[in-house]
Image: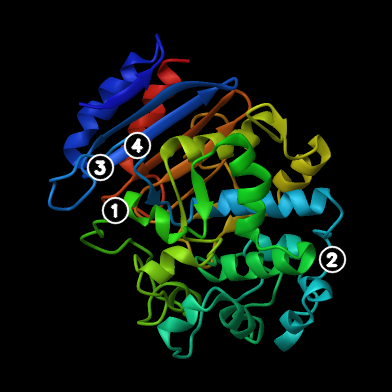
Amino acid sequence: MADGYVAPGFERVRETFDAGLAEELGAGLAVVRDGEVVVDIWGGWFNREQTKPWAQDTIVPVYSTTKGVSALIIAMLADQGLLDYDAATASLWPAFGAQSKDRVTIRQTLAHQAGVPGFLAPIDPDLWLDPPACAEAIAALAPLWPPGSASGYHPLTWGYIAGHIAQRAAGRSLGTILREDICEPLGIDFRIGTPESEHPRCAEMKKPTKAGEFGEITPPRKAAFFSKWAAPVRGSTQWRKIEIPSANGHGTALGVARLYEAYTTGGMIGGMRVLSQEGFDNLTRRVWKGDDLVLPFNVDWRAGIIGNSNRLYGPNLEAFGHSGAGGSVGFGDPVAGVSVGYVMNKQSHHIMGDPRSLALIDAIYSCL
């Protein structure tokens, strides 16, 4: 049975969560509606041995659900005039212009159009644990398709690029901006770059038992996912401590829901405006919609966040969200006035649209 709070009228959400715990190890779910927390529940187990319960302050890596948070930080910098989405990425970071990437814009780069979803040639996987060096290695890559001509999901490289853009534009790291400008002032339990003092709260992850269904392993898919060097060893102290704005955000479900509230409100979190309406519109303007060269489906890319054309984030097309490897989800729906965070430590093989989160989302909307 779940612990936590459910507002009157949202009992079905708790019932669905409780029923789903049989398929979980541990999990948390939070819903913010019109600025009020209406669901904040958790249950199951912190560890694979099932000896320690998931607690209110348990945090977990949310993998690519991190990207929607990082996209918000980049949008803040654009809103402050520190970068221009429609300028070439190389205008801010000259080295990124190598190998005919000199004209791809920051907006296109954030929409996974730069053509560098990973490394085709072998690298030492520990390169991923050195963000400055990894960013420079990514900048030197030849694109796997003409930049700007298509999208191909950049599962890890996106974060090193976004982080380097933020550092050059603001003189602070992306994770520092998130902590100092949003999470600390608003008391949000989420971070990109998790200090060692917080590691005892990090739930143990259980990896999926099989790989996702990607279809033919093309060069972009191989570079992104299907090589021995496509990712670092996750879960180490060093991996948690460094900033990977594409993949290693750590937090609670409520932390995710509160950050994605910006996508519900047009740039407000907890009553604090983090983006102007113009800045929000700039972030959420469609950049590319079409069949992705890495993900095996059609994707509606904005500047680092996903439009809801596939209706993975509730029934309303106006919602924006992102999913993380294994099943985590964050989204904001301005029509319904809700933002949602779902986190878990038993990863599934579903690339997006995990049945666990879809059942919970259906329950949430049935209560609105």
Say if 68 sits above or below 132 in the image: above
Residue 337 seen in the figure:
yes
Q: Residues within 10 Å of mark 4 (few under 14, many from 20)?
A: many
Furthest residue toward right: 81
The numbered disc on residue 28 is 4
Could you tell me which secondary element the residue under label 3 belongs to?
A: strand
Q: Nearer the viewer, mark 1 or mark 4?
A: 4
Residue 213 figure quarter: bottom left
Q: Which residue is mark 2?
A: 87
The numbered disc on residue 347 is 1
Q: Are marks 3 and 1 in contact (CB under 8 Å)?
A: no
Residue 258 figure quarter: top right
Q: Amino acid at mark 1?
A: Gln
The numbered disc on residue 252 is none
Q: Which residue is mark 3?
A: 26
User: Which mark is first along the chain, 4 or 1?
Assistant: 4
Q: CA distance from mark 3 to mark 4?
A: 7 Å
Nearest the camera: 364 or 144?
364
Q: Residues within 10 Å of mark 3 (few under 14, many from 20)?
A: many
Q: CA distance from mark 2 to mark 3?
A: 43 Å
Q: Are marks 2 and 1 in contact (CB under 8 Å)?
A: no
